[in-house]
Image (cartoon, coloured by chain):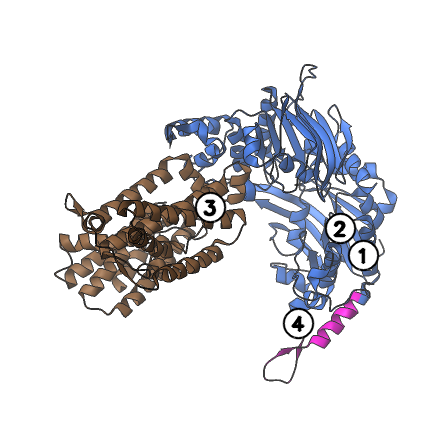
Chain colours: A blue, B brown
Amino acid sequence: MTDPVLMDMTGIGKSFGGVPVLSDVSFTIEKGKVVALLGANGAGKSTLMKILSGTYSRDAGSIVIDGQPAEIKSPADALRYGIRMLPQELSIFPDLTVAENIMLAALPTKSGGVVKTLDGKGMEATAAALLKRLGLDWLSPKARMGTLSHHVQRIVEIARAMAGNARVLIMDEPTAALAEAEVQLLFSIIRRLGAEGVAVVYISHYLKEVFAISDRIAVLRDGRNAGTFTTAETDVDAVLEAIVGNRVGDIYPPFATPDAAAGETVTVRGLAVPGWLRGIDFSVRRGQITGMHGLVGSGVEMVGRALFGAVPRTSIAGAEIDGKAYAIRNPGAAVAAGIGLVAAERKREGIVSMLSLRENMSLANLPLFTRGLTVDRRKEQATTGEWIRRLTIRARDPEQAIGTLSGGNQQKVCLARWLLGELKVLILEEPTRGVDVGARQEIYRQIRGLADQGLGILLISSDAEEVAGLADRTIVLAGGRVTEIYDRPTDAAHLMSAASKSAAA
Amino acid sequence: MTDLKSTASAPAIGSSRRARDLLAKPWAGTVMLLIFYLIIIVIFTVLSPFFLTFRNLISVGTNASFIGLMAAAGTPLIIAGGLDLSVAAVAGLAGVVVSMGVAVGLDIWVSCVLALIVGSAIGGVNGALTNGLRLNPFIVTLGTMSIISGLSLVLTGGLTNPLLIDSFNWLGSGRIAGIPFPLLLMLVVFAVIWWILAFTPFGRYVYASGGNPDASRMLGIPVDRTQIMLYVGSGFAGALAGVIVAAMLGAAAPNAVGGYLLTVIAAIILGGTSLFGGRGSVWGTLLAVLILGTLNNGLTLLNVSSFWQDVTKGTVLLLAVGLDQLRVRAQN
């Protein structure tokens, strides 16, 4: 605490479309220290960091840097203050060299000539010096980026972020795709940065890593401060409690009554995807919500789509749906076998944004609306109208392009479309990502209603709280394997510690 | 031209909300095109006494019919996210196939059916290469275009072969109830494709496949099969256009149609179909085919050199695409 404060964000508020995402949040960054920023999905971590890095503008509050009020209105402003954000996805240029990748924002040129030419030697020397500073002198600045392994590319990205006058480095889930040895390398780089006085904001769900590298821990919950800890003086339980809170599960419907007769709808043996899943067995029961939880990179994100036939090179030892053998071929075959999937990336994989609400609703089940050769539009309209009422979808008009609806209402359409046909299992990937609390409650209620009607639900979510609130039983994944099975509802803290503990093992 | 500009873009400049709402309607693009069509009709009528006669208008439609056939089939293909640059070359080859069939002693109608089969098969190859091997449709159909037009020249030695058979030539010059057969055929094809797009599940898959192929696959929609069928349809339409041209000319000329490829693509884009897929209508394409045909006809009547006609065509296309962009922005 003797370290001088580098940046101070106080009273930060931000809302999107009238829905508050951050209210009265304070966040302090100290010189040369690592501060971990934790919270459940949707707690506001990313929004806060996007405000700091100039992507979003704040509605309220102030930012003070070096004791002076700072105006950060654009990413360029943030860069001037030395704020650097490491993107979650790799953004590299595979055909350029390491040196070019690092120096791209400010390529040195030779002076004197009529035409400015690239100073290749100077560029390589500067890049080499920077790599040395980070303890990476084994890395050649002349190497072509595309020939390097994934994690080395990641590290070059850090070097790029450090070029110039970097003072704060924001890392969002930096270890999601890294193996243990690579994590240690990353940590050694972070420690070197700290020794030079560079501050690091470290966002992660892996609590073990957070405790290994951070000096302080700041927790957000529902867009508010939920606790700040000095890492050396706290423990995992206290941090977990701050993340989850003691909020009553009032937005979740009641669990299913334990029913011995509820058999298995789906049984899966040896589901494998190279690089993601190492042969997992699981089942989904009729009338129940089976939760599946794991951290980013645990393989949990692949389970649903692999079973649905949407992942190349998926292999499986065997699967049955209602006792009948099911072979993975393609999504069309999955739909025919009675599987539905609501994809996590709604915009990319869920909706056809220029088509109307009605057309999106019927798209997966057009044969049901076909009479003779043509689509029976009247029946389509009647069914759409009914589901708009039942799910309280807020839309001006069923003929409105679905792209113009809010995320929550789009998601309700994505849910409703599977309820039109003869469905046996519904796979939900991150069903409430980017959905506001009001719509969330309605979606949870509908999911429970579907289970009550006898459907088997597989709820795949990296949000432990959501899984804890909704699932009747839960499977935890880590490192591409099933590591824990809870046959009754469990709490979020248990799930989070199970997911983060086993990942490190 | 200045007339057109001030009239058509006035609602976009006017800041009133109602104009913007009007512009955002899905049919606004087609209506703008229709207004444009009426304007050029008025201009040509004023400038040339020969223009607004029944005979001339019919001849505009008839001369544009083979372009219309290709553009009609190309529209759903582009809506679904595909592209067929080989269609005009297929038309050329179709004429060659007909003349060769006749030369080896086949019945003329058998030869025609053979040409249609060859065209459809080439469409199938295009579809298989783009959807099976996931090659870029621009590259694939550029390649097949070059192969096919080359083959047509190889097969004929570059020569034009006469095809003077009365019953066959009727396809090019015959009339039903006073309306030339090619024009009638084009209108029927447009109507059928409109019906498919508007009323059948397949039509819905066309829009979904082009609008968001990933989402469509995740819903179990046969995106690849949809596209392959559209490539086959485009090949079939290309061959049909080739047969009609051969019947009109009374000869099979390997190079007769190839030069019209750009007009076909221009008509589809001018008609409001998005090159990125997901959006478009055949009525827009039909209007655009008629507009381009009318411009050609009117400028010829006014003795404007054919060089200037190309300049005009390009200008109209750019203008239309620019206006359409304004419309899309108003929608968002």
Residue receiving disc 4: A107
Q: Subunit of mark 3?
A: B
Task: Give the spatial CA distance, label 3 vs label 2.
Answer: 40 Å
Tag 3–tag 4 contact (CB < 8 Å):
no
Find disc 2 in the rendering and name its residue. A202
Q: Earlier in the sequence, mark 4 or mark 1?
A: 4
Q: Is residue A115 magenta?
A: yes
C-alpha distance separating marks 2 and 1: 10 Å
* Mark in the foreground, 1 or 3: 3
Q: CA distance from mark 1 to mark 3?
A: 46 Å
Which residue sits at x=32%, y=54%? B100
Q: Which residues are magenta?
A: A108-131
**Same chain? Circles 4 and 2:** yes
Task: Specify the amino acid type for callout 4.
Answer: Leu
Identify which amino acid the numbered label 3 is placed on.
Gly
Q: Nearer the viewer, mark 4 or mark 2?
A: 4
Q: Between tags 3 and 4, which lies in front?
A: 3
Where is mark 1, residue-wise? A190
Find numbered disc 2 in the image and state the secondary structure of the residue it sits on: strand
